[in-house]
Image (spheres, rainbow, N blue to C red):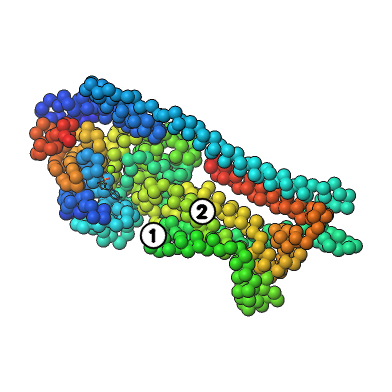
Amino acid sequence: MGDGFGGGPASPGVLNPKAEIRKPKEIRKPKEIRKPKAEAASKLGRDMSTPQTDRAVADGFAVRRATRPAWAVLGERALEVLIYLCGISAIVFVLGIFFFVFKEAFPILGNKQFSLSQFLFSEQWHPTSELNKRYGVLAMIAGTFSVTALAMVIAVPFGLGAAIYLSEFCSGRVKETLKVVIELLAAIPSVVWGFIGLTVMSRLIVKYTGAPVGVNVLNGGIILALMSVPIIVSIGEDALKAVPDSYREAGLALGATRWQLVWRVLLPAGKTGLLAAVLLGVGRGVGETMAVLMATGHAVHIPHSPFDSVRTLTANIAAELGEAPANSDHYQVLFLTGVLLFLMTFVVNLAADLIVRGIRRK
Amino acid sequence: MSTAAQIVVQDLRLAYGHKEVLHGISFDIRRNEIFGVIGPAQSGKTSLLRCLNRTIDFTPDTRVTGSVLVDGEDVRQTRNVFALRRKIGMVAPLPVGLPMSIYDNVAFAPRCAGMSRKSELDGIVEQCLRQGALWDEVKDRLDSLGTKLSGGQQQRLTIARALSHQPEILCLDEFSIAIDPVTTMRIEDVLKELRRNMTIILVTNLTQQARRLADRTLFLWKGAIVELDRSEVIFSDHPGNRQTYEYVNGIFG
Ligand SMILES: Nc1ncnc2c1ncn2[C@@H]1O[C@H](COP(=O)(O)OP(=O)(O)O)[C@@H](O)[C@H]1O
Ligand SMILES: [Mg+2]
């Protein structure tokens, strides 16, 4: 056996000189490939263009060095500015929305009859009472939380399971069909889901659980889950699709079964994307209005079981804003509820961001 | 070196869709030899390896005929494909550090095979990382991410990982394509050690590497065998086939 780079087999013939010449090239090759892709590509481009130009010059052709026309350069600039504006506009819109919602709500904070602690910690909501006005949204916070939590308990395992199935266990016709159906499911308007909750689901719940009313936390939770699942599935599937195939091949070549591969490689590798999928589902749960308005029974009441009717923050705003006289206390409190929702989603997103960052760093 | 054939490939044909890329090749690989496979890009070297451990199964629309016997058992009829894959260690051209800690990377295969005792796993991890010539560099940070290692270290990690399930056969597919010459030499030394207790299939685009390491070398071209012989013959001035001489000496196409 040869040892070291120059070593060849102990053949009687001398080493071929050409083989010697080839060697440095072989040694250089790995290093070049290790360079970042873009750099390598640009280098490649340069290397390829230079000799051609040289040859053309040598052959006596007049060669114009390629320069990009002014409009192309300017166009690129303009595009850059446009994209920058698009990016900035997102921030402008968010701040703008927050500002206007807050502006409508602000006067109530200076009102002597209004107390913020009552708003947050009282479950009494009597905005239209003549004698004893009460603006406590605790029951509705509880309503939002209970419905969202139940929806997530149902939707997350289902959604992630379906995403895993779609991306890892099925292929071809079945996969295409399922994806189309799931996208269709995501496109059903929430009012239609509300109908289903109000009629079909509520009847089923009364029939099979014996609950006195069919519109309750359970109903809203199931409806919300049905609405969140398509989102979780499609984003979760994208997240798994983004895991490089080389991981799959490496894992399977090590003797992992499909399940072991999913559990030990794909879920850890896709966790940021999967978390994003779950959080968008949560976002939908917190923010959804119409369907829960119709499916949860609209009772201001801290729920003690899934069969209690509740009212959510969003449903409350939707139902009452139309009746509240503009700039009345009631109206302002509803806007304050909007601010509260805004802060809640902000906290959820922030938490998500921190979690994702924590995961990334690990 | 015993001359018993450990792997027998008979009339192996492989087609991706309508495109046949291996045209009925037959050869055998002996126990404990380093078996070099050389040939230009696209000649079917990787595809050949993927037929051995049946990772070809994951590419849809492929057709394989003929047979590959490993220790007398036809891989396509094997009852336990997971056990087969654990019998064959596979190192890919570009290092694929799985997105987990260095320790978990190496412990992955034993864990999949059902091993969970910490002390046992610790032992395997250390032994394999030592065999992969990586232990000294990473022993203090076994729980940091495997993907954060340098390219050369990651490639040694994948070798350590391929050894973690105690394979009888180790396949290396152009392992040095993304690493520097010094690391390449270190790994080549590792391979010389390893050959004592396993069969090594060394697919390489560096003909000199096969010349340095392989006992026998197969020259594969466009899915057909041009020549298979002892490396002394393949790399001599008078191999059995003129094409071999031209390819090895860089005259070829
Ligand atoms: N997944 C695939 N689908 C279709 N064709 C493939 C696939 N993988 C490889 N091939 C084809 O098979 C031939 C051999 O490829 P490969 O085995 O990768 O060669 P090598 O490793 O020698 O470069 C090539 O023509 C390549 O285009
Ligand atoms: Mg290849």
| Residue at 75% from the left image edge and 67% from the top image edge | A299
Q: Tell me which label, 1 or 2, sits earlier in the chain.
A: 1
Decide if residue A204 is on the left or right side of residue B159: right
- The residue that label 1 is drawn on is A171
- The residue that label 2 is drawn on is A235
| Residue at 36% from the left image edge and 33% from the top image edge | A41
How far apart in space, not on screen, are marks 1 and 2 (Cα)? 18 Å
In the image, is residue B137 above or below residue B73?
Answer: above
Going by the picture, which residue comes out furthest to the right?
A: A131
Which chain's residue wears label 2? A
Mark 2 neighbour density, 10 Å: few (under 14) some (14–19) many (20 or more): many
**Ligand 1 within 8 angstroms of badge 1 C-beta:** no
Which chain's residue wears label 1? A
| Residue at 46% from the left image edge and 61% from the top image edge | A180
| Residue at 14% from the left image edge and 37% from the top image edge | B244
In the image, is residue A357 above or below residue A310?
Answer: above
